[in-house]
Each structure stands twice: as C-alpha cells, then as structure tokens.
Image (cartoon, helix red, strand yellow):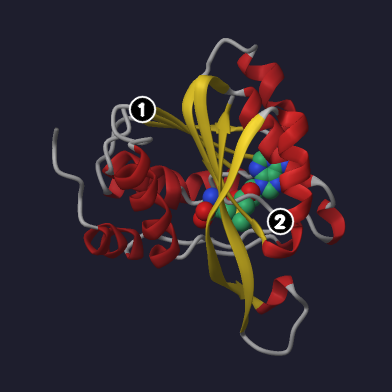
Amino acid sequence: MSKIMKRKELEQHLQDLEGFSSPKILLEQYETRAHIASCMLHTIESAYGDLSQKTVLDLGSGCSALGIGAAMLGASYVLGVDIDADALEIASTNIDSFEISNIELLQCDVRKLTQILHGKFKFDTVIMNPPFGTKHNKGLDSLFVEVGLSCLSDKGVLYSLHKSSTRDYFYKKAVGWKVEPCVLAQLRYDLPATYKFHGKNSVDIEVDFWRFQKK
Ligand SMILES: C[S@@+](CC[C@H](N)C(=O)[O-])C[C@H]1O[C@@H](n2cnc3c(N)ncnc32)[C@H](O)[C@@H]1O
C-alpha cells in the first residue's frame, strides 16, 4: 500500500490554486478553503480509503480544489461538473498548473447530469461542497445530494458539506434515499460576507461534513 500524502502538504498545494475571479452570488461561488478541503479529503482517504484507485465525481466543482486534492490522494479518475464556464476555465488552469492528466471537466447544470450521463457512468465516490440552498437556490443542497447518489456505483459513497442547521432535515432525507448517513465533523466555515449580506468581510457559519453510504 502506498503512503498517503501528509494533510499539511496537501493543504500547501491547495493554497496555490486560483480561486473564483468574480464569484457569482446566485451560483453561491465560494471556494472550499485549503485547510477545510485538505481535512475533508485526508479523512476520506485515511479513514475510509475512498479516494485512492477510485473514480470520483466532483459535483459543483468550481475551481476544482476538491477534484485536484482527490487526484493528489490517488484517485484513478475525476470528473468535475459545474454549470459555470468561467469557473471551469479557472479549474482548467489549476489542473494544468499541477500537470494532472486524469481530471476531466464537464459544463452542466446538476439538474441535467443524470440525463447526460445516461446512467452509464457510475462513480465509486462523489465529493461536493454544494450551494447551501438558501434564498434563490432553495432545495439545491438536497438536489445535489440526490443527483450525486444517482451517479454512484452499488457500494458507492458520497461526501458533502451542509449547514449544521439542516442536520435533522438530512437525517430524515437519508431514510428515503436508502443511505447510511453520518456526520463526520462539524466545521467552522468562513463564508464571504456577500453571501450573507453582512457588513463584515466574512462570517463564520457551522457546517457539517457528511458521509452518505449506499445500503
Ligand atoms: C460553494 S461552490 C464550491 C466550489 C468548489 N467545489 C469548491 O469546493 O471550492 C458551489 C459550486 O456549485 C456550482 N453550481 C451552482 N449551481 C449549480 C448547478 N445548478 N449545477 C452545477 N453547478 C452549480 C457553482 O458554480 C460553484 O462552483
């Protein structure tokens, strides 16, 4: 078994990535910061072995922080899907700067993904930091999970971030989705103030790091 890259080293690499140049508020474009992304990905690999040698779908991939991190931890293939062409362009530059060759990008609205993949492509692992589904995007957080689950192979597993205030809601949803839900950690997430219409530069919110395992 090969050694896993150290979490700190992964964080340092992810810190070098280019972020959204002009984030689109309606698409809830804020990057997963290098520290949180590295903690998530390192846990996914070190505790569960769900990245190395696995096919990975990065849903709402933005500038590809999660996808690039997954590739660095040994994923065999990563598909990054995002609705926004500008974000995908930045992602492409980031991927090239690390000379990673096993990440592909697809411009697609999550609502159309199942139709586009025709159920032909199934992934071992889905990773995402989806829009929190507030205001204009009501319900988008749970739609992302539903679509992600529909793209999983039989024993696949999905990892996601959701506001802690929605914890009970997701536990209830998991019953209908026929998945084993688990909150792996509660994180303090540094959300740019624009997304909360707040006076300060950024505001901390409580976010749950979830693991949904197909039954
Ligand atoms: C919170 S950002 C996370 C970006 C990136 N995954 C990360 O962790 O840094 C959410 C991403 O979802 C994308 N997005 C929003 N609505 C979408 C939709 N309907 N279909 C696909 N992607 C969408 C946004 O463009 C944005 O890149």
Q: Is residue 50 left or right of residue 52?
A: right
Residue beneath the point at 32% across and 63% down: 16
Q: Nearer the viewer, residue 84 or 175?
A: 175
Number of numbered markers: 2
> Taking 161 as reference, is 148 above or below it?
above
The residue wearing badge 1 is: 54
Distance between the alpha carbons at the discs numbered 1 and 2: 28 Å
- Give coordinates of residue 40: x percent, y percent: 43, 54
- The label number, if any, that marks residue 167 in the structure image: 2
For badge 2, the amino acid type reads Arg
For badge 1, the amino acid type reads Lys
Q: Nearer the viewer, residue 139 or 96?
A: 139
> Taking 201 as reference, is 96 above or below it?
above
Q: Is residue 108 left or right of residue 52?
A: right
Q: Quadrant where the C terminus lies?
A: top right
Question: Is residue 141 visible from the viewing direction of this image?
Answer: no
Residue beneath the point at 63% across and 70% down: 206
Under tag 1, what secondary structure?
A: loop
